[in-house]
Image: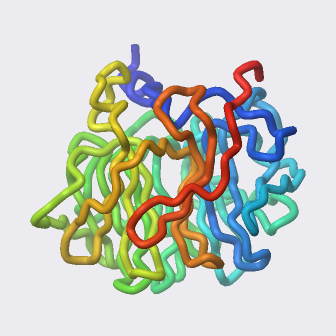
């Protein structure tokens, strides 16, 4: 079996599982990206797999005032490993990539509908990370594999419809990593994944720097990160210690870590297996939607990070395993 296909198919049950029934009033997806959308002052949940993976249906879920509402839309279709980021200049959310997706196509969402845009110089991508860096006025894309299955170690800067490859030393091969943007320190922060899942790297727009701190979250795959503007800290949650789906260590309670620019601090350890994770600028809190336990059929719920610990604010019950 092709090596790329092998490790890309190791999907953690705590992140991907059975679909929930959308008729119950909450998202019927197995994965997704949580992005704060300032025009509606709400968190939008985009992407993710569902019961019809090849469908052109690309409904977006809006979470506001503790309520879910579905925004009917057609566009890129159901997809996993689909990183998204908000572009303040255009007022749109941009998403890019997924396995077997057409090369160089960015999808934007304006709050009501999807639109595709061809990006010059960029191939298809999967298992990568993408963030918007304010001080660069550009998206930064790193890691994953291109359409030929080649693991990419270039740093890509996308601005004004054009992609530029920055052939500079960096984190090397990365997949199943996590990346976010530190607005205060003006750094792109990448942690884990790939062949050295214990490493922490930061990019200022010119060069990558490997960070060695006193404490560390250790090996991480399939984890989540977000920048908490209220505390000026990076929050890291969940993840596997290795890529063995049968190793009991990967079923242990996910840990939550905070990075203050100097050191990592373990702030929580609760049984929250996230499906989507992000920073809600309206509430000024990190929020996650997922399962309150390890099995695929564990109850679904939503939590906010408050005073260094997770607080459950909504229960959605058991997922529908008949979808």
Q: Nearer the viewer, residue 12 or 299?
A: 299
The residue nearer to you, when weighing 221 against 268, is: 268
Closer-to-camera residue (307/273): 307
Instruction: Look at the picture and state if 150 lies above or below 295.
Output: below
Residue in front for this viewpoint, 92 or 279: 279
Q: Position of residue 299 (x, y in %)?
A: 61, 35
Q: Residue furthest top?
A: 1
Residue 224 located left or right of residue 116: left
| Residue drawn at point x = 47 percent, y = 82 percent | 230
Residue lying at 48% horizontally and 42% vertically, measured from the top left:
273
In percent of the image, x 40 and y 48: which residue is there? Answer: 270
Which quadrant holds residue 92? bottom right
Q: Looking at the figure, which quarter contains the N terminus?
A: top left
In the displayed structure, does residue 320 sit left or right of residue 296? right
* Apparent side of residue 164 relative to residue 198 in the rendered image (left or right): right
Q: Please identify the residue farthest to the left as the structure is shown.
A: 214
Figure disc tally: 0
- Vertical arrangement, residue 70 with respect to residue 56, above or below: below
Expressed as whole percent of the image width and height from the top left, the position of residue 104 reads 62, 53
Against 238, residue 133 (above or below) is: below
Colour scheme employed for the rendering of this structure: rainbow
Quadrant for residue 207, please give it. Answer: bottom left
The answer to whether residue 152 is visible is: no
Q: Quadrant of the C terminus?
A: top right
Camera sees residue 273 = yes
> Residue at (55%, 69%) from the top-left corner?
279
Residue 149: image location, x then y, percent: 45, 33
């Amino acid at each position: 079996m092709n090596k790329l296909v092998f490790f890309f198919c190791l999907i953690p049950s705590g992140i991907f599982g059975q679909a929930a029934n959308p008729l119950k009033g909450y998202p019927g997806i197995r994965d997704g990206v949580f992005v704060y959308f300032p025009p509606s002052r709400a968190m939008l949940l985009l992407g993710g797999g569902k019961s019809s993976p090849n469908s052109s249906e690309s409904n977006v879920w809006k979470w506001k005032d503790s309520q879910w509402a579905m925004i009917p839309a057609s566009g890129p279709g159901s997809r996993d490993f689909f990183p998204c980021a908000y572009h303040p200049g255009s007022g749109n959310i941009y998403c890019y990539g997924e396995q077997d997706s057409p090369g160089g196509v960015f999808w934007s969402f304006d709050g009501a509908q999807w639109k595709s845009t061809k990006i010059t110089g960029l191939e298809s991508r999967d298992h990568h990370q993408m963030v918007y860096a304010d001080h660069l006025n550009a998206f930064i894309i790193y890691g994953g594999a291109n359409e030929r299955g080649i693991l990419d170690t270039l740093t890509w800067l996308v601005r004004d419809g054009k992609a530029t490859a920055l052939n500079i030393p960096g984190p090397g091969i990365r997949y199943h990593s996590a990346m976010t943007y530190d607005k205060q320190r003006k750094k792109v922060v990448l942690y884990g994944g790939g062949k050295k899942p214990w490493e922490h790297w930061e990019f200022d727009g010119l060069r990558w720097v490997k960070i060695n701190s006193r404490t560390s979250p250790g090996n991480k795959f399939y984890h989540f990160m977000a920048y908490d503007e209220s505390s000026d800290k990076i929050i890291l949650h969940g993840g596997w210690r290795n890529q063995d789906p049968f190793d009991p260590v990967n079923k242990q309670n996910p840990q939550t870590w905070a990075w203050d620019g100097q050191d990592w601090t373990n702030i929580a350890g609760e049984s929250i297996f996230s499906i989507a994770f992000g920073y809600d600028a309206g509430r000024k809190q990190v929020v996650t939607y997922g399962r309150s336990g390890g099995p695929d059929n564990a109850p679904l719920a939503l939590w906010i990070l408050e005073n260094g610990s997770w607080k459950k604010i909504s229960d959605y019950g058991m997922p529908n395993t008949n979808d």
